[in-house]
Amino acid sequence: MTTPEHVVVIGNELRLRQTFRNLVGNAVWHTSPGTHVEVEVTDGNR
């Protein structure tokens, strides 16, 4: 996985944190143990 050095996301911090927790939590909860979960941040143009 490659990550940018710096990412700026404009939005409500609490809601963004909640969304991230929900997405990752769902991935962990609904997949088999040991399953690889990948999170990607894009610029929205892709």
Image: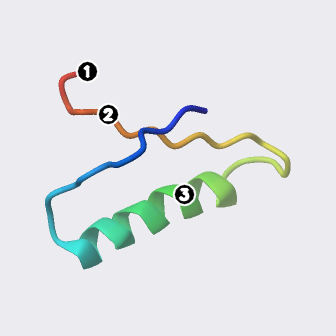
* Rendering colour mode: rainbow
Q: Residue at x 24, y 53 (%)?
A: 8
The mark closer to the camera, 3 or 1, is 1
Q: Quadrant of residue 19?
A: bottom left
Q: Secondary structure at mark 3?
A: helix
Judge left or right: residue 22 versus residue 33: left
Q: Evaluate if marks 2 and 1 touch, with contact meaning CB atoms under 8 Å apart.
A: yes
Give the residue number, with chain letter if any, for mark 2: 42
Judge left or right: residue 32 versus residue 42: right
Give the residue number, with chain letter if any, for mark 3: 24
Q: Residue at x 18, y 24 (%)?
A: 45
Q: Which mark is residue 19?
A: none
Asked whether 32 or 4 is in front, the reply is 4
Q: Which mark is residue 46?
A: 1
Vertical side of 36 occupied by 16: above or below: below
User: Which of the two labelled residues, at mark 3 and mark 1, occupies the earlier sequence position?
Assistant: 3
Asked whether 30 or 10 is in front, the reply is 10
Query: What separation in Å lies between label 2 and label 3 (alpha carbons)?
Result: 17 Å
Q: Picture coordinates of residue 35 (x, y %)?
A: 78, 42
Image quarter hosting the N terminus: top right
Q: Picture coordinates of residue 16 (x, y %)?
A: 29, 66
